[in-house]
Image (tube, rainbow, N blue to C red):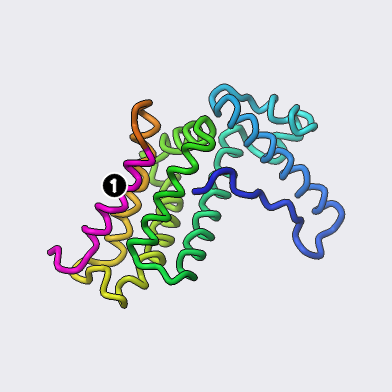
Amino acid sequence: MQTCPPIDTEPPPDSSRRAHNKHAVRTSLLQAARQLFAERGVAETTAEEIAEAAGVSRATFFNYFQNKHGIVIALHDAHVSTLGLLVDDLLSEPLTTAGRLDRLFADVAATAATAPVYFASLTGELERELAVPAVSAARTEKLTSTLVRLLTPGVAAGEVREDLPLRFLAQMVGSTYISVIRYWRESPDYDITLNSARASHFLTGALAPGKG
């Protein structure tokens, strides 16, 4: 995740005027929600306030999102997409697996430091769904698949162990990634910059060949 990833403001190519207008309204709602969530958190923001900030009616809000949680999911999807782009960037650079993990976890720390209210409230809302597989399974799978891509070059480079399935290793990286965010959100004294670096170092050692 990165701090306030860009929301797609470009309408679909060759879209009609109606589709263009719908895209513009949805974008305005997402931008307004992100700003309000950053200022006061998700719980303290209402759908009506989001609509007002976006310059549309309450009824219009509900034409685009079933409820406030729907807009939370849309913002989270933007973050997940940005995480995928971050992984693409890391794979395009001549980095080791350790270097890629360092950058991945440094990104988490930067997000938490730059937009703490927004990041804490957004991730807190989403974590409530983890106990509902029908809701969380697709989201978890997307994270796992992204981390499999991150680790794959390390196998050929001899930096990632092969005695355990790559998917399992990616799941362990994902679990650590989520745990760092959770501990930071739950404890005001948690140093996420320090512990993100520690998590990356720990995972680099755990992933290395010869650890079986």
- In the image shown, does 63 or 163 lie closer to the viewer? 163
Residue farthest left in this picture: 212
Q: Residue at x 29, y 47 (%)?
A: 198
- Residue type at mark 1 is Arg
* Residue 207 among those drawn in magenta: yes
- In the image shown, does 93 or 61 lie closer to the viewer? 93
128 relative position to 70: left or right: left
Residue 141 position (above or below residue 131): below
Q: Quadrant of the C terminus?
A: bottom left
Q: Which residues are magenta?
A: 192-212
Percent across and percent down for residue 168 are 27, 60
Query: Is disc 1 placed on a helix, strand or loop?
Result: helix
Q: Residue at x 28, y 60 (%)?
A: 169
Majority SS type along the magenta span: helix
Percent across and percent down for residue 70 are 59, 39
Q: Residue at x 37, y 44 (%)?
A: 178
Q: Residues within 10 Å of mark 1 (few under 14, many from 20)?
A: some
Percent across and percent down for residue 32 are 69, 35
- Which residue is label 1 attached to? 198
* Residue 208 among those drawn in magenta: yes
Q: Residue at x 46, y 49 (%)?
A: 107
